[in-house]
Image: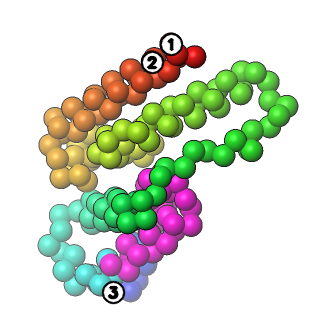
Amino acid sequence: MHITEFKSLVADHKNRLFRIANWMLHNAEDAEDLVQEVFLKLWDIRDSLSKYRSIEALLVTMTKNMCLNLISKKKLEFQEYPMEWLNTQCDEKKLEHREELGILQQIIDALPEQQKIVMQLKGVEQLETNEIAELLGETENHVRVILCRARKSVKEAYQKTLRVS
């Protein structure tokens, strides 16, 4: 792979990888550093990239795995969204909406890693089930099961939270 091909590859995928890393780490600086490390590792294996069916799947998998490694290494806890960004002059509906989003984010953060990743790829990245299956090395049916379980867990936890409040 020549440097121009590599630069094109980086330009095509860096934003998506950053969004995934930032979503998993909840820290933009760590996400930027991690994505750079992903591309450094990719550069190191550039001569053997032809053996991979999908470089995009490889990049997403590398990003996901490196995020999980960083989380376990530093024992990072997913950070809650800071409340200082709330404008004190917001009307009640906006405030309620932000509180609901915060509750949903906490519920999603508490899901098992695989469920969080599938929900991210489906809901935020807008990938199709077959694309997610390819990226994660799973069958489409297994991805559907994971997504169904994740949605059910989120729904049940959210309803439970509403009953308690």
Determine whether 111 is above or below 152 in the image.
Answer: below
Please, what secondary structure does the residue beneath circle 2 have? helix
Q: Residues within 10 Å of mark 1 (few under 14, many from 20)?
A: few
Q: Is residue 23 magenta?
A: yes
Please, what secondary structure does the residue beneath circle 1 have? helix
Left or right: residue 142 compared with residue 18: left
Disc 3/disc 2 C-alpha distance (Å): 55 Å
Q: How crowded is mark 3: few (under 14 residues within 10 Å), some or many (20 or more)?
A: few
**Labels 3 and 1: the sequence-earlier one:** 3
The residue that disc 1 covers is 163
Q: What stretch is highlighted in magenta?
A: 14-41
* Disc number lying in front (3 or 2): 2
Q: Specify the quadrant of the image occupied by residue 38.
A: bottom left
Disc 1/disc 2 C-alpha distance (Å): 5 Å
Instruction: Tell me what residue is drawn at x 42 percent, y 59 percent.
Output: 75
Task: Depth check: give the residue in front, 136 or 7.
Answer: 136
Q: In the displayed orientation, state which residue is furthest to the top.
A: 163
Please, what secondary structure does the residue beneath circle 3 have? loop
Which circle marks residue 160 in the picture? 2
